[in-house]
Image (cartoon, helix red, strand yellow):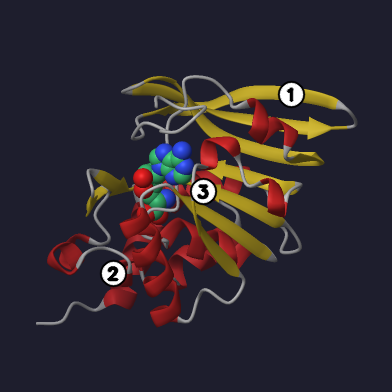
Amino acid sequence: MIPDWRSERQRMVDRQLRKRGIHDLRVLDAMRTIPREEFVPPDCRVCSYQDEPLQIGYGQTISQPYMIALMAELLELTGCETVLDVGGGCGYHAAVLGALAACVVSIEIIPGLARQAQQNLLRTGLGGNISVICGDGSQGWPEGAPYDGISVAAAAPEIPAALMAQLKDPGRLIIPVGAMFDQELRVIAKSGGQVQERVATFCRFVPLRGDQGWQ
Ligand code: SAH
């Protein structure tokens, strides 16, 4: 039997997002409409809306729906921003950001995953304002900078200087920082030449690789 994806999405939004405090209506709307099942590998499609990360191959995972919604909400997007998505994976997170911002650059270090993201975005018709780049996002993507928002979906040992340099003023950077398997999700807000930083929650992301990552 083919699952009723719309109902699954609605249930996910109600039980996993709203109940835990996600309140940005644009974020809830994006999560309610974007077909996560089109981005996960075919053999775990039925698990698409489970309250957990899922394997997407190459030892990587697509984040839990709640984490993606939280990170998107923390960016405080209004629809006119340029956003850098570091750690593009299968492209789902980029699709959510694409629904909330004017344009998204999604950078992924594993060529096979960057290819999948590109195909998933093309197939779903959600990639119109998203550029998928294959490269080391720990150094950002200077060609598209500066960014109003930067969202990093892999854990860094420290905040990469290049990402701070490519963030606009005002602008917001959301990034998990800490040890390889245990981090805090930090919100860095640049405004009026000042930088403010706070911890939104504790989390566990796959490690950021590359020059400013865990190598
Ligand atoms: N947001 C993704 C999944 C994130 S998993 C999704 O929606 O599917 C983290 C991803 O970060 C993995 O795909 C991993 O390959 C990628 N990654 C790790 N280090 C990276 C780097 N330095 N630059 C770009 N991508 C990186």
Q: Residue 210 location in percent, x, y?
A: 45, 33
Q: Residue 13 location in percent, x, y?
A: 40, 60
Q: Nearer the viewer, mark 1 or mark 3?
A: 1
For residue 103, side relative to residue 179 (left or right): right
Alpha-carbon span between mark 1 and mark 2: 37 Å
Badge 1 local density, few (<14 within 10 Å), some, or many (20+)? few
Name the quarter where the N terminus is drawn: bottom left
Q: Quadrant of residue 33?
A: bottom left
Query: Which residue is found at the position 42% from the left and 61% from the top?
Result: 91
Residue nearer the viewer, 195 or 200: 195
Instruction: Give the mark nearer the N terminus: 1 vs 2.
Output: 2
Disc 3 marks which residue? 22
For residue 189, side relative to residue 31 (left or right): right
Secondary structure of the residue carrying tag 3 is loop
Query: Which residue is found at the position 65% from the left and 35% from the top?
Result: 163
Contact (Cβ within 8 Å) of mark 1 with mark 3: no
Q: Quadrant of residue 203?
A: top left
Q: Residue furthest right?
A: 192
Instruction: Give the mark nearer the N terminus: 3 vs 2.
Output: 3
For residue 167, above or below residue 54: above
Residue nearer the viewer, 1 or 193: 193
Disc 2 marks which residue? 37
Q: Residue furthest top?
A: 179
Q: Mark on residue 196?
A: 1
Q: Mark on residue 24?
A: none
For residue 205, side relative to residue 192 (left or right): left
Query: Which residue is found at the position 49% from the left and 48% from the top?
Result: 135
